[in-house]
Image (tube, grey):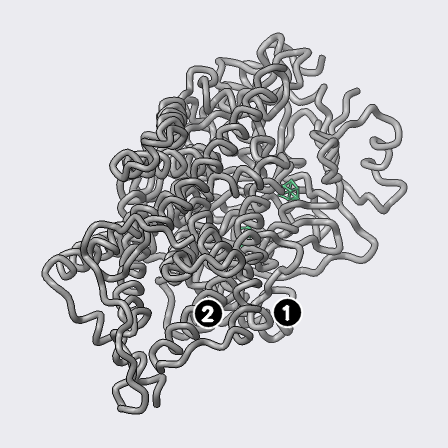
Amino acid sequence: MLIQNFFRDGCKELLRGGWMYRLWVGLLLLMIAAGGGFYLEQLDQGLVITGLSDQVSWGYYIANFAFLVGIAASAVLLVIPAYIFNRKDIEEVVLLGEAMAVAAVVTAILFVVIDLGRPDRLWHLIPLLGRFHFPQSLLAWDVLVLSGYLVLNCAISFYLLFCHYRGRSPVFGRYFPFVILAMFWAIGIHTVTAFLFSANSARPFWHGALLGPRFIASAFVSGPALLIVALQIIHRIGHLRVNRSVIETLALIMTVSLQISLFFVGAELFTDFYNTGSQHVASSKYLYLGLDGFSGLRPWIWTALTLNGIAVTILMIHPLRRNLVTLNTACLLAYCGVWMEKGMALVVPGFIPTPLGEIFEYLPTVSEVIIATGCWAVGVLLFTLLVKAGAPLELGRLHRTDGEQDVVAANGPSGGPIPTSSAQ
Amino acid sequence: MVWNNHENSNMSDQHDVSTQSAGTVTVPDPHRRRLLKQLGIAGAAGTTAASAPAWGGSTLLDALGGFFQDQYQRMSPSEIEAALARIERKAKRDLGVDIHCDNTPPQAGVVFGYALNVSRCRGYRDCVQACIQENNHGRDPSSTAYIRVLELDHGQMNLEQADQYYDPETVPVPGKYYLPVQCMQCADPPCVKACPVEATWMEPDGIVVVDYDWCIGCRYCMTACPYWARHFNWKQPTIPADQVNPDTHYLGNRPRPVGVVEKCHFCIQRTRKGRLPACAEACPTGARVFGNLLDPHSEIRYVLANKPVFQLKSELGTEPKFWYFTD
Ligand code: SF4
Ligand code: SF4
């Protein structure tokens, strides 16, 4: 009964909101509709409407998938300080991280589904009913860890929010073990996703031990970048009070991760280009310099590296990192830089040249991009809705109304500038 | 030399013509192909049967039966019978052809192997043509082919220098040699390991097969294969009714649906009945030696024992059951 009320009140909350909120949701729905329309065409015609080919058999969809798994994993960057280092300021916003993780995992899974040639046969993946090739297939591992991560994060968030709703404080022993599990799981999802690529000895470009660490490092750039911007927006809109110290911690993590990430890129560049002759080098040459007159990704990767370079410079200068305008600029640059570098620039060169030495370039089609944009819109919408319904719960503004245990909102929403006081 | 120049040019001329008419892999310019693809022309090019929806074109009962169909290895004999009947009905509906689809089991004491004599291969691509006809490949320019013949410079083994779209007046071109590549039927196949739903596996006779009705089209196996032997049906393949080969096998050359992966299966529909693969039969130079690896008196065992043999990319440890040798 109470659970029903919980969901009913949550849904009611979703229907409330000013014109900005409605416009935003409407816009997202429009994008989803457009993507859905083109996806119907893909279902009808087959994946021929994409730019993919036997030569480059994974492209824009899988690139976004790899990137989004990173976003999902980086929720730990709020979870660890909140629960392990007992940072109260971060604990206040940790559920936003959970919401981001849930939205990102759902979107990542969506990207895999739209990439399938036969989504109607998805049930073949269900253990026993279908034939789940576990533990041999790394894709089976990925399915398992991603769905597990989704369940875990949903369960933790639900428990905490439901406690707030009932006006009780959560029982530490009931959720903490799962928080710890989710922490390791987060690193797990991204490692498994990296292994999905690096396991292929047929693809020298990915077949190296550095791919896993590179994935984690870049995830810890893109995740905080997104969080920093999202937290400020949520603070401005007045849903949740976000302490300045949270932003500063995230900015620091991002700085270090971006430095490490760029170092990894440099290390790979050295290994590839000091000695010519490895097979790895053909793909890298294609990516960075162009190969036999083909250089479709060259401007792409150099743009990505430039964006990351500017971002890291901004972040390393203390006054600039502390200034919200320059910090946000750096976040935007780094987010785009990582999306470009770890998305297309990581997936596509693995297929160029093919194992038989053919160079065949790939460019996503308009339909493909629109479908992918629709998927992104699903993720953003999901995040919006989760925050919209979750924030009042978290604040205690929304609680059970059957009169048993009313709790007065402790700290109301604040729309002013972010307070600079630190909780440390 | 068996073939003199005159014969060479005849062979290749004739070959060029057949290549054009059947419209196969030998599109010389990769750019053009990409362009076609992006414009969506390739998808729409002059097809009638392609207008059938992705998994439509069947009666409701067949559609339901197909949807709930189990994986091949788990099906009972009666379920397999029903599946085979569905395949035949669908071919009749979609292609207008009466085909026969069976599931001839592997023979006991047989593991197939293949060896190819590089010094005899002259790059005619007759094997490619024969394969396309035998295995009911789509017949438009963007369609797939299981065999790729690579043209390489003498003294060169770097595949990055290979050209599979060679299109000279006559083959062989002096100073070049030819290396046909197809699925190696690896004894330790990375593609099988990769598949998340066990839609691809190795049969007891050593053939790595795909259940086209179980594959979800994730294409992870294509990523895993070091020989670029797996191909995806980006759209519904189309075959003119008079070109359909009606003798088919469930795991072999039956018409494939859109959205699934396929690969060379050593002509399972022929070889399990004691015939040679179409490519071996078609090769005019006798470069291809096919046989039972478990039979000590087979020709392939003789080749493996007495000729200088090698495997492609043997360093990757997938243990191909396809060898190359020289005289
Ligand atoms: S050659 Fe490729 S498709 Fe064939 S068995 Fe080996 S890995 Fe699989
Ligand atoms: S494409 Fe089909 S056969 Fe290949 S890994 Fe995916 S499900 Fe398996």
Q: CA distance from mark 2 to mark 1?
A: 39 Å
Q: Residue at x 32, y 50 (%)?
A: A421
Location of ligand 1 given as a quarter of the image: top right
Residue for badge 1:
B74
Nearer to us in this view, B63 or A382: A382
**Crowding near the residue tagged with mark 1, few <14, some 14–19, many ≥20 C-alpha atoms within 10 Å:** few
Nearer to us in this view, A11 or B18: A11
| Percent x, y of residue B297 | 89, 40
Residue A178, by quadrant, is bottom right
Disc 2 is attached to a residue of which chain?
A
Residue for badge 2:
A156
Mark 2 element type: helix
Residue B74, by quadrant, is bottom right
Cβ of mark 2 under 8 A from ligand 2: no
| Percent x, y of residue B177 | 64, 16
| Percent x, y of residue A221 | 43, 40
Q: Is residue B247 visible?
A: no
The answer to whether B305 is drawn above or below residue A93 in the figure is above
Q: Nearer the viewer, mark 2 or mark 1?
A: 2
Marks 2 and 1 in Cβ contact (< 8 Å): no
Where does the N terminus of chain A fall, quadrant-wise? Answer: bottom left
| Percent x, y of residue B92 | 42, 61
What amino acid type is highlighted by mark number 2? Ile
Residue B189, by quadrant, is top right
Disc 1 is attached to a residue of which chain?
B
What amino acid type is highlighted by mark number 1? Arg
